[in-house]
Amino acid sequence: MVLIGIIYFFGPDGAGKSTLVKGLASQFYDGDRKVKLSWMRGSHTLVSLVAIFLSKFDCFKGSDNPYYHIRVPKKLKRLWQFLEFVSALPVIFVNFLIPNVMGCWVLADRYTLDLIVWLCLTTRDKSFLSTSMSRLLLTLAKRTSAKFYVTANVDLLKRRTNDVWLPNEQLCLYGKLAKAVGAHIIDTTNKSVKESLHEILPAVYATNHKFP
C-alpha cells in the first residue's frame, strides 16, 4: 500500500531539503488543499531524557552523538538503537501517518531513512541496516508516494554545515538507501531553488494522481 499524500525529502545536512520543502509547499497552498510540513529530528522523547542523564557520566561521554555528546558502549548499541526506534514511533504516527490519514498532504523534511542514518552514525554501527527495525523504517519510506534524495557536492556540504560527521559518511549511507527505495535524485550543486523545483514537480505530478 502506497501512502498517497506523503512526499518525502531526505539527504545529508546542508543539501537544501528544508528550502525545497518550503518551495514545494508554496505550490500546494490553494485554499482548499490541507498541507502539513513535518520534520523529524534524531533522538526523541524518552531517549532524549536518557541521553541527557547519561552525558553526566564519564563512561558515556563522547562525540558520536553531536547533540548530547555521548558515546554508546559497544555492548549497549543494539539496546540503544531499540530505545531510539521505540521513541520515534509516536513521532512517526503523530507527525506523518495520522495527518496523512486525516487528508493532509504531508511534506516530510526528514523521515524514516534519516532515522536509519542517524542511528548508524551515532552508534557507529552500520550493521543496524540489517536489523528488523531498519527494515520496517525502510518499508515506511518506500510506501510514501514520492521520494526525493537531496544531495550536493561534498565541498558544498562542508561549507553549509558544521556537523561533526564527515559529509561523505552521510553520502555513502544515504546513497545506498536512496537506491533501495527508488528515490528521485536531486543534486542541488550549482542550482537555484527554482531549478531544483523544476526537477521535483514533474515527479510529483507523475506519482500522485490526486495532485493538483
Image (tube, rainbow, N blue to C red):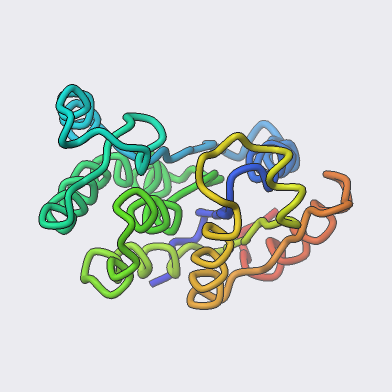
Residue 103 position in % (x across, y down): 45, 45
Residue drawn at (59%, 44%) of the image: 13
The reply to whether residue 9 is in sight is no
Residue drawn at (54%, 67%) of the image: 172
154 and 15: which is toward the camera: 154
The reply to whether residue 166 is in sight is yes
**Left or right, residue 10 beside residue 155:** left
Residue found at the very far front of the displayed protein: 58
Residue 45 position in % (x across, y down): 23, 31
Residue 33 position in % (x across, y down): 60, 40
The image quadrant that residue 57 belongs to is top left
The image quadrant that residue 88 belongs to is top left
155 and 14: which is toward the camera: 155
Residue drawn at (35%, 39%) of the image: 65
**Left or right, residue 197 beside residue 93:** right
105 and 148: which is toward the camera: 148
